[in-house]
Amino acid sequence: MKRPGKKAATDRSFVIALSRGLDVLRAFRPNDGLLGNQEIAARTNLPKPTVSRLTYTLTKLGYLMPVPRFEKYQLAPAAMALGYAALANLGVRHLSEPFREQLMRETGGAVAIGARDRLSMIYFGQSRNGVVNVQLDVGSRIPIATTAMGRAYIWALPDEERVALLRELRDHYGSRWPKMRDGIERSGETVAKYGFAISAGEWQDDVHAVGVALKLNDGTGPYAVNCGAPAFRFTEDRLRTDVGPRLVAMVRTIEAALGGVAPQPTKQSNSKQTTNKENSKKLKPGGKVAKVAEGIRQPSSS
C-alpha cells in the first residue's frame, strides 16, 4: 500500500494522520479475519509504533474491534457501515444487476462491475455461477494493469489522467512493467476497434475475460464491467466475436438507462469492422493510441 507522496506531504490541506488511519482500515481484505499490528505495518509500510497508536485510536472510535486472545483486530460494525452506505448509494450497482444476471446466463461467465481503488479495481457488484476458479466477491480487488476490467478503465480516462496512472503503475511494478505496458497498449487498440479490452491469461493463467468501461454524465466514475470464465470456455476467438460484443451492448444499455451515453448499434467483430470511423483513425500510426503508448514508454517528469 502506497504512503502519501511528496506532494501530499507538502499540501497544507492534506491531513496525513487521517490518511494513515484510513490506510490501516484499507489493510483489511475480504476473508482476512484478524490482523495484528505487525501484519498491518507490513501492508501499510508504516512504522509499527505508528500502527499501534492508530489501531488504538480506531478501536476507541469503534472502527476496529480488538481480539485480546490473539492480540489482533477485526473490522468493527462502524467500519462495515461505511462500506454498506457507499454500496447503497451506488445506483449503477442495483440497476446493472438484472443485466449482469442475463449476460451471465447467456455466456456462462461471471460478470462484475467495479471502480478504481488506487492501483486496483474493486468489485462492488457481481453475478457468478461458480464457473470461474478464482473466488471473487464484492469488495475483492484485482490489478488494473493486467485485467480486462482494469484495462477498460485505463482507456476510459482522459489522456492526462491516464498518463499519470500509467506513471504510477510503472513506478510500482519496476522490472515487470514493460510486459504489462505492452498488454495495456494492445488493449488500447482493441478498445478503439471493438469497444472492449481483453485479458487472456495475463492476470490468471487459466482465466480469460473482456472488459468495457461504463461512463455516466453525473460526474461519477468511470466504472468498468467484465465478463470472464476459464480459458477453455472463453477462447480468444469467442471473446472477440461473441462475449465482447454482448458486454458492449449491455453496458451501452445501462448507460442509457442511467442517463449516460446514448446506446450505439454494436457490430460483430469478425470482418475487420470497427465501431466507428473515428476509432479506426486511432489505430493509424501517430493516432491517439500510438501517442499515448509513447507516453507510457517515456512518461514526462512530474
Image: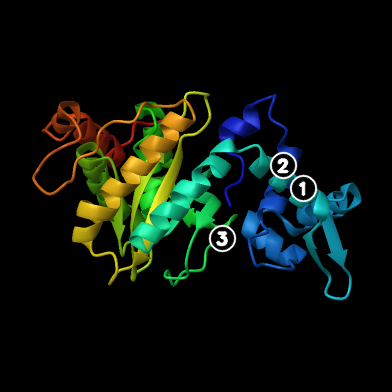
* C-alpha separation, residue under disc 1 versus residue under disc 2: 6 Å
Find residue 15 and report its image quarter.
top right
Q: Tag on residue 17?
A: none
Q: Tag on residue 137?
A: 3
What secondary structure is marked by label 3? loop
Q: Is residue 194 left or right of residue 58?
A: left
Report the residue at 23% width, 37% height from top.
192
Residue 282 spot, x, y in % from top left = 18, 31
Please tell me which residue lies in front, 290 or 177. Answer: 290
Instruction: Tell me the amino acid under the disc marked 3.
Output: Asp
Report the residue at 50% width, 43% height from top.
96
Q: Are marks 1 and 2 in contact (CB under 8 Å)?
A: yes
Asked if residue 107 is positioned above or below residue 281 in the image, the reply reads below
Instruction: Tell me the amino acid under the disc marked 2.
Output: Ala
Find residue 193 and report its image quarter.
top left
Report the residue at 56% width, 58% height from top.
140
Query: Which residue carries the number 1 mark?
Result: 81
* C-alpha separation, residue under disc 3 versus residue under disc 2: 17 Å
Residue 114 spot, x, y in % from top left = 50, 47
Q: Is residue 4 left or right of residue 249?
A: right
Which colouring convention does the figure follow? Answer: rainbow
Asked if residue 142 is positioned above or below residue 261 in the image, the reply reads below
What secondary structure is marked by label 2? helix
Quadrant the C terminus occupies: top left
Report the residue at 32% width, 42% height from top.
248
Query: Which residue carries the number 2 mark?
Result: 85
Residue 85 spot, x, y in % from top left = 72, 42
Nearer the N terminus, badge 1 or badge 3?
1
